[in-house]
Amino acid sequence: MEHDSRHATRRQDVASGYVLKTATLNTLKKISRTRTLYVGKIGPGVSEEMIYSIFTNAGNVNKVIMGVYAHTHQPAGFAFVIMNNHKDATNAVKHLRKIRLAGNAIDVDLDEGFVEGRQYARRERIINNNNNFRGNNRGNRGGYRGGYRDGRGGNRGGYRAKRRRV
């Protein structure tokens, strides 16, 4: 029986399928020589020092930039790691993609390059607590439609045809 091994393994030192599908030609050129890595799905207890120490196993790290929320400056769960050269960056992608760091399997991917301002998360993460959780207590405001009387609510409204009298 002949075994076809063309699709048995996938290169681990290239950009992810998402990047390859969504990138423009210019972005792909930048990625082919980048030193910058995007690290996602970072748990809340992970520090810059922890990321630095993990990535030094793959090569020389130039800088670690943690992603933060713009207003609170709290960690946002991602970081940019700038390696000293492209070979170290691809080595990090190959060996550190999907490793577990503080309980989370992190994502490591090649990035087109860090630009100041990208360390800020696009939006704040909303955490439900007792102050902003609405729950099921809708008060006297009805259900799906109508129902403002007596606090009953529900789906009682709708079209009602007039009866013809004979």
Image (cartoon, rainbow, N blue to C red):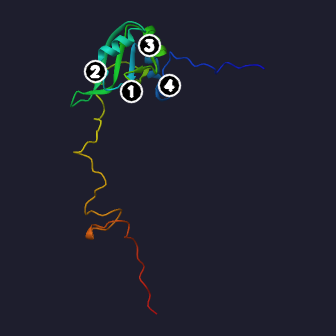
Q: Which mark is residue 95?
A: none
Separation of residues labelled 2 and 4 (CA atoms): 24 Å
For marks 3 and 1, give the one nearer the viewer. 1
Image spot of residue 125 (x, y percent)? 30, 36
Residue at the spot of label 3: 92
Separation of residues labelled 2 and 1 (CA atoms): 21 Å
Is 118 on the left-hand or right-hand side of 59? left
Q: Is residue 162 above or below residue 27?
A: below
Residue at the spot of label 4: 20
Question: Mark 4 or 1 closer to N-term?
Answer: 4
Residue at the spot of label 1: 41
Q: Is residue 110 visible?
A: no
Question: Mark 2 or 4 closer to N-term?
Answer: 4
Residue at the spot of label 2: 116
Q: What is the three-letter code of the residue carrying label 3? A: Ala
Tag 3 secondary structure: helix
Question: Mark 4 or 3 closer to N-term?
Answer: 4
